[in-house]
Image (tube, helix red, strand yellow):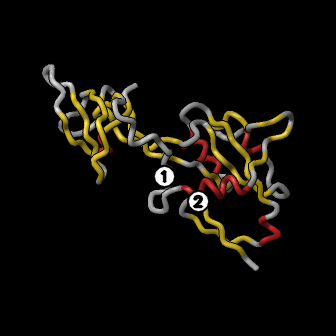
Amino acid sequence: MMEKTSIGSQTVAEEPLFQALLRWFIVLTKPSREALAQANLERQGFRVYSPHLSRMQRHRGRWVDRIVPLFPRYLFVQLDVVRQSLVPVRSTLGVAGLVRFGEEPKVVPNSIVDSLVARADPETGLHRLNSDWPPSRGARVSVVAGAFNGLDGVFERDAGGERSVVLLGLLGQQPCVTIPSGYLAPTV
């Protein structure tokens, strides 16, 4: 009987016996070279899984929405331990090495990768981090988009419908302003 597994947007039929020979390993990439390593590994016929998430980051003084790796500098690579060697993985452009415990590369249980794939958004493939949102009353927040972009304030309460009430410091006063919750970030 054939089983179907999916990685990202790929669905692959695998035979149970063949599936037992597949193992996931953790690859350490060179700094900011996850995409390069992934492309080169896939070009060599390896199955690669690189979970990503959407995150607001500061870039040149502005907050922008960026897609970043969930585990910076790490990828999961799957190979058939009987038919494929790890030697080409180690020498792939963009790869720094394999995660090892002692002499042997660390094998990641299939259930961990399957769990990561299952937690990704089915439409975008992106992960979401569980955050402490809404923050507690009195927490410092920064407005990262919209008309009040760049201002700091104090979180007052959740207004429902993806909105928050914030006390903004404007002209020596603290007026209550309702702002979309996606426009707010914790003040660092």
- Count residues near mark 1 (Cα–Cα under 10 Å), then give few for <14, some for 14-19, many for 20+: some
Q: Which mark is residue 118?
A: 2
Above-or-below relation of 139 to 181: above
The residue positioned farthest toward the left in the image shown? 171
* Image quadrant occupied by the N terminus: bottom right
Residue situated in front as seen by the camera: 186 or 32: 186
Location of mark 1 (residue) = 126
Res 31 label: none
* For residue 28, side relative to residue 152 (left or right): right
Quick check: 93 left or right of 180?
right
Q: Earlier in the sequence, mark 2 or mark 1?
A: 2
Circle 1 sits in a helix, a strand or a loop, which is it? strand
Badge 2 vs badge 1, beta-carbon distance below 8 Å: no
Residue 5 sits in quarter: bottom right
25 or 116: nearer the eye?
116
Q: What residue is shown at x 36% (from left), y 41% (from top)?
A: 65
Q: Is residue 43 visible?
A: no
